[in-house]
Amino acid sequence: MSDAKPPATPTPPVPPMAPGVSIPPAPVDGAAVAPLPHRSQGYWRLVWLQFRKNGSAYKSLVLIIILFLIAAFAPVLASGKPFVWTKDGKTTYPLLQYIVAPDSSLTINYFFNYIFVATLSVTFCLLIRRVAWKSLRARNATLAGLVLAALPFLMPPWQWKIDTSKLDVRIMHPWRNDEADYSKLAKDLDRTKGDYALFALIAADPITPKEGMILKEPSSEFLLGSDKDGRDVLARMLHGARISISIGFIAVLIEVVLGIFFGALAGYFRGWVDVAISRFIELVICFPSFFLILTIVAFIEPDKRSPFHIMFIIGITGWTGVARLVRGEFLKLSELDFVHAARALGCSNTRLMFRHILPNAMAPVLVSAAFGIAGAILTESGLSFLGFGAPPPTPTWGEMISQGKEHVDTAWWLIVFPGAAIFLTVTVYNLAGDGLRDAMDPKMRK
């Protein structure tokens, strides 16, 4: 018998590992091999991770959130109403009245004030859950916060009273507001008798002018100056952000709803339905959208014009782009296997359209909505600049620039600050939409 050993089998080369990745140790004979942890990543998680890699888009999203919070917290930042007002032994809370019962000339405030109260309530409930109620789920805490936020608005609309020995809050009809000029009354407070007033961070009212304060340059009293009527420019810009943001979101929401409805019908049923809807879309596209909006706005009396009219008009004139995107996606997705499988299982047309096809067709719609919000804000600013926007004294950025063109030589701040706000808002929405488009495109993923 020979003592020669068989030739050793050559060991395959070990491929180079990525930085930070280690090779797990070899299992011991007879020991069970534990499966490696694996976390599946869905489509939207991949989109979010790709979106975060885009620095400009991610920073733009942060700025959008900041702008939204500024609009929601505008009553706290600038309202001209004190948090606490103590006079002759009676304590009232005028800012609470302003939040629950906003001025009728600023109807959109009711919506944003609700968001403000809801944000505080949800934050409060989440803090309680984190500190004391460890077993409370986040969803339940959020629901509890929304219910708590809705309580002030579920009170009888004609009167809300809370009377105690040290608390006296009277909320009269929601469409009425306390017109007291607290800035003048504050001069009569007697500290020796316990009179006290705690104003908002910027004690200014965007509606009520101040006497003798016309076209004042930026100073410690008026951080961004005053307009031709003596109103604080900063306070009007903060409340004007509510108008611009709400018009952008609600107008695009109308566009998306109409675009999805008509685009889904045309792409799914095809045939004569597709031909009729496509010809109607082409007919609407033939009209310049801005001039069509001007024509429709001209039929509304200036005194009855409100931001809601602008939202609705922009929405019903800008849905064609979304409809064409949705139609193309439905034409492509309706021929895929998962749709045929769902149809074979007996799913109705409505379920096929809105349960199976539509969720897979929303990617280009979201990108279009991001750009649409920026376009709607710019359109509203143009309408207000031309005098077709919300009637005075509703604060809008376009209306403030329109005032500034009359005093361009003496009041530069009336054009610079509102113009910079419009430029910043439109830019961040466009950058966020651009980043979302790249994140949803597989060819752009790194």
Image (tube, helix red, strand yellow):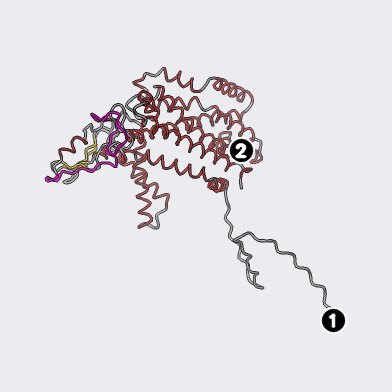
Q: Are marks 1 and 2 in contact (CB under 8 Å)?
A: no
Left or right of residue 398, residue 54 in this image: right
Figure check: 64 above or below 229: below
Q: Quadrant of residue 299?
A: top left
Q: Quadrant of the N terminus?
A: bottom right
**Number of marks drawn:** 2
Q: Give x and y (percent) for residue 296.
A: 45, 19
Q: CA distance from mark 1 to mark 2?
A: 74 Å
Q: Residue at x 36, y 34 (%)?
A: 237
Q: Give x and y (percent) for residue 151.
A: 31, 42
Q: Which mark is residue 375?
A: none
Q: Quadrant of residue 65?
A: top left
Magenta residues, as a range?
Answer: 191-220
Check if residue 194 falls in the magenta segment: yes
Q: Which mark is residue 346?
A: 2
Query: Viewer-proximal residue, 354 or 320?
Result: 320
Prevailing SS of the magenta stretch: loop
Q: Secondary structure at mark 2?
A: loop
Q: Give x and y (percent) for residue 331.
A: 63, 32
Query: Viewer-proximal residue, 68 or 357?
Result: 68
Query: Viewer-proximal residue, 23 or 350?
Result: 23
Check if residue 22 falls in the magenta segment: no
Figure check: 357 above or below 23: above
Q: Residue at x 19, y 38 (%)?
A: 186
As shown in the figure, which amino acid type bears the numbered disc 2? Gly
Q: Secondary structure at mark 1?
A: loop
Q: Which mark is residue 3?
A: 1
Q: Give x and y (percent) for residue 401.
A: 39, 27
Chain-order first, disc 1 or disc 2: 1
Left or right of residue 271, residue 138 in this image: left
